[in-house]
Amino acid sequence: MTGEKKKKKRLNRSVLLAKKIIIKDGGSPQGMGDPSVYHAVVVIFLEFFAWGLLTTPMLTHTTPMLTGILSFLSAPLIGALSDVWGRKSFLLLTVFFTCAPIPLMKISPWWYFAVISMSGVFAVTFSVIFAYVADITAEHERSTAYGLVSATFAASLVTSPAIGAYLSETYGDTLVVILATAIALLDIIFILVVVPESLPEKMRPASWGAPISWEQADPFASLRKVGQDSTVLLICITVFLSYLPEAGQYSSFFLYLRQVQRFSSETVAAFIAVVGILSIVAQTMVLGILMRSIGNKNTILLGLGFQILQLAWYGFGSQPWMMWAAGAVAAMSSITFPAVSAIVSRNADPDQQGVVQGVITGIRGLCNGLGPAFYGFIFYLFHVELTDLDASSIIPGPPFLFGACSVLLSLLVALFIPEHSGPGVRPGGYKKHNNGAQSHSHSPPSSGAEGKELLLDGSCV
């Protein structure tokens, strides 16, 4: 018994020491100023700018199927844990392990392959970032804030591939890897020093030793909750059917432009930049106008309509100008994901922001694993070789047409998503959480409910 007490004391001291790394003495979060959307924006920009530098000079051969499945399983878990222990520590964790493979590109290819294969467990920064934003924004501001975060992601990829390609051609790949590593380290330091904790102190346990139920953190339990909540189930099906072709498109589209549409490398880079800039405009200015004028649900439907048009145009397009026009439509379709994240966040309890965003991010991670395989199978089925194809064929891009059909099904499912999942509207600001949130998040579900705690309260179709 004495030995067990000593072990518990040592464990408690370790927990308190770990907590002091994140929280200052006195309980106030470390960082500069109050938590804001701009902290989230900088974290996202630096992480994806670092990886964007490596997009053109070296096509990193990852294992998308494995990383996608790992993200699918881990995103709800990490989101649920961030609902209990705070966002900052998990931002640090996800960014560190997501960027850890970068320096290994030149140090050891074998270690690079091993680390990047397992980094899918932590490649869920978006779920933590969106939960961070939900903690600090009011409900009516949330869609605009999510649009800004998504636009920042697009902005990080507008210039970084071109910069990486130039530096690689002029100075070699080693300099690009060093620069990307330095930017990743800057992101980690920024989180440690500048980013404050967004989750209110009253919603976190008194110590890091406070219990958390496995049902709350278990990814399979989260999926069971999805099946028990009609609204979030419809949203997840919508995300899966719409993002599956988008993930497959990312894996082959730029090669398709070069080999089938005969775009030069410079033209492809210009295409990426133009579509990225238009996406930034769509997710910052257009998204806010649409959310105020036609509402959250109709914005999602409009974004899915643009995506159907874009994929059909890619599938039947045989001229370069058609690709440019479809790219402009693709930029407009980028409003869908921030609108979906906003409707999920708006209807979720304050102490469940991490897990619901984790479920959505997990679905997207699964699509990142299945999408490339889906597109590759369709190319194979139609005997389409990206190395040599006559662009004058009737259907130059059959996978894009199958993708359009998938998004059409997604749109039909989205028609049944209710605009509001409950009669009451929660304010959503982090200063407005009540003390009952903490007890709710740590108490087991009542026996009468039989564990059927819904992710979204009062949802109905």
Image (tube, rainbow, N blue to C red):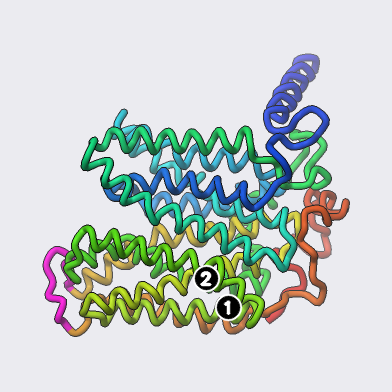
Residue 389 belongs to the span the image colors magenta = yes
Side of 25 where 67 appears, left or right: left
Where is residue 420 shown, x and y percent of the image?
A: 72, 77
**Dot 1 lies on which element?**
helix
Q: Which residues are magenta?
A: 383-393
- In this rendered view, identify the residue nearer to me: 24 or 37: 37
Local packing at callout 1 (Cα closer than 10 Å; few below 14, some 14-19, many 20+) is many
Let me know if residue 198 appears in the view: yes
Let me know if residue 77 appears in the view: no
Magenta stretch: helix, strand or loop mostly: loop
Which disc number belongs to residue 299?
A: 1
Residue 8 belongs to the span the image colors magenta = no
For the N terminus, the image quarter is top right
What residue is drawn where x is 45% and y is 37%? 183
- In this rendered view, identify the residue nearer to me: 33 or 405: 33
Where is residue 295 shown, x and y percent of the image?
A: 65, 79
Q: Earlier in the sequence, mark 2 or mark 1?
A: 1
Side of 329 where 399 appears, left or right: left
Label 2, on which residue? Answer: 335
- Quadrant in which residue 266 is drawn: bottom left
Task: Determine the CA span between mark 2 and mark 1.
Answer: 8 Å
Kind of residue sitting beneath label 2: Ile
Q: Is residue 34 above or below residue 100?
A: below
Kind of residue sitting beneath label 1: Thr
Where is residue 21 shown, x and y percent of the image?
A: 68, 28
What residue is drawn where x is 37% and y is 52%? 159
What residue is drawn where x is 78% and y is 36%? 28
Side of 26 where 253 appears, left or right: left
**Dot 2 lies on which element?**
loop
Where is residue 374 shown, x and y percent of the image?
A: 33, 67
Question: CB atoms at circles 2 and 1 under 8 Å apart?
Answer: yes
For the C terminus, the image quarter is bottom right
